[in-house]
Image (cartoon, coloured by chain):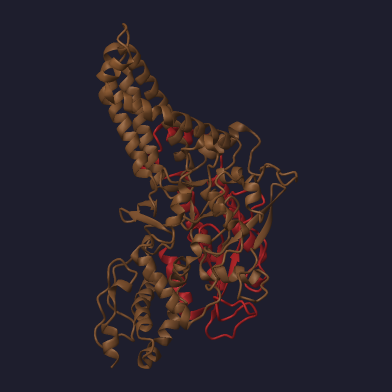
Chain colours: A brown, B red
Amino acid sequence: MKNCEYQQIDPQALPTPTPTPPPHHGNDTEKKKEPRRPRRKWEVFPGKNRFYCNGRIIVARQSGVLPLTLGLILVTSGLFFIFDCPFLVKHLTSCIPVIGGVLFVFVLITLLQTSFTDPGILPRATPDEAADIEKQIDNTGNTSYRPPPRTKEVLINQQVVKLKYCFTCKMFRPPRTSHCSLCDNCVERFDHHCPWVGNCVGKRNYRFFYTFIVSLSFLTAFIFGCVTTHLALRAQGGKGLVFALQESPGSAVELVICFFSVWSILGLSGFHTYLVASNLTTNEDIKGSWSGKSGEDVTNPYSHKNIFINCCSVLCAPMPPSLIDRRGFLPADESAQTGSADIELPTLAAKSEINVCTQGTKGLLESAALSPLLSTSCPQGKPQNAHSCPETSPALNSDPTSEFSKGCRGNHTSSSHDDTSRPRHTKARSKKCRREALHIPNPAFDVPVSPTSPDAAPDSKARSHKGGSLTPLH
Amino acid sequence: MATEFHNLQELRHSASLANKVFIQRDYSEGTTCKFQTKFPSELESRIERTLFEDTVKTLNNYYAEAEKIGGQSYLEGCLACATAYLIFLCMETRYEKVLKKIAKYIQEQNEKIYAPRGLLITDPIERGMRVIEISIYEDRGSSGSSSGSSSVSGSTAR
């Protein structure tokens, strides 16, 4: 009787990318002794990221407009080398394609590094850590509503800073860390989520991002200047601009693209230069954390009070390591336990009405529920991601000012895809977690979804909203 | 690493994990990596205060060395920028070198000081540099001490 249930496992419900072979008759109540392919940590990463090259490359789940960014850069530079360079080399100097080439390579490399580098993602707290933190927080014990936001105050360089508790990652966020709802990760020194590069910009890739926008502004200005010179030289002798454009149609396209982008990119570079010189992040600038809006005497506690030192500490500091260890292997006992749980849970959920099955696997289910792997993968399945933390609203509206229109304004539209674009394996995991919750209600992971923060509603329309009034909790 | 694993296996076979203590980060000087040196009460009966403080202070010094901004780091940063940061793909960064030293130091401390007292330090890098996790083991034969409790996770009701 119990054999027939286990044969009907739906392999699609298993979260592992390589489907394990369906279990043989009657051997399912014991732990699987078959040797499994050792899995790497990126395969069970709970955030919304995609990994390529066996974990070497990390990108956000939504690539945003990265293909558009790449396309614009390649097309403009290609047209420049094809149409303008031959003429300018003949009439001016052969340095022009060299300079253009160097800038182009620089821009491309730094763009790819910004997109494919881990921005400083903090791994989620282990269950033991989360339990320890819960113990330290005063809990009224009523879990029927979301408890009030938990904060902890620390003194940083004689400045009071509030650390918020992240319900998704189950830890108090370090200072300057923010939770990005698009990537569903806490990112250290969170600047903003940039759809143009398709990744968050944080501690580890800020220098790449800054170099990218500075070199891109040089490249755009350089191409714009060269194209103008080219057309001016062609139009000499009374021939006129129309004639020049007819002779070199590519230049017209370049002119249009460069004209519209040079202002916004130059503006963005200027803005970030100001941020680097004062050791601020876009997030803090938008929220007005250190501008004294609340009337108190607040100063930026992270600034070294010297522009040169600030610049060096942001751009020239030692490169911190990636904390998520994407290519590390999972401990053998965890992957084995997960494997057996993967097989047991879908069966149990599918045939829960049959008592014969449930009694046999209930013990295994309880032990699997304590498995740290399952518990860390649980929260992402819940729809709370869209409303997870109030900070995400500034993250979404990172560059609201209109003069920086090109820079990262579009990300609020991509947030609407949050709930709809879930790949198969996160769906399976969320199904698994909900079923597990039926049998073993675990208050630590049954955090209700309701967003209590009043800014959850206005954040979708408050694009140009400055951060001061947006987040009353701060 | 092999010896630490061996010790760990020995501990796991002969002792049961009783409790875990987490040493949190100290943010008083900013976001640089530094851990609190406050002596947790659960370890009072297990290890001398000075030994514990020495370990944490040495770890803090290592991290400060890794994150130091000085002449050498400026040169490295400028050189990296000039090569479009491609040297990060080829070279081991200073931080990574110091992390290796830290891993060796922790292994050595575990072998000499902590494992004989039934304690085990987990490298903070494995916990996202948020905490120093110290696992407290009890001998299977002996009864639980005042710091021990058999359930590790979810023990909110104490």
Residue A147, image x, y percentages: 63, 69
For image coordinates 64% across by 63% down, the residue present is: A150
Which residue is at the front of the view, A402 or A312?
A: A402
Q: Is residue A440 left or right of residue A296?
A: left
Q: Residue furthest right?
A: A296
Residue A206, image x, y percentages: 48, 42
Question: Can residue B97 be seen from the camera position used here?
Answer: no
Residue A260, image x, y percentages: 42, 30
Which residue is at the front of the view, A94 or A55?
A: A94
Residue A71, image x, y percentages: 32, 38
Q: Is residue A388 left or right of residue A59?
A: right
Q: Is residue A371 above or below residue A103?
A: below
Q: How many marks?
A: 0
Considering the image in quadrants, where does the N terminus of chain A appear?
A: bottom left
Q: Is residue B84 above or below residue A352?
A: above
Which residue is at the front of the view, A444 or B141?
A: A444
The quarter holding residue A2 reads bottom left
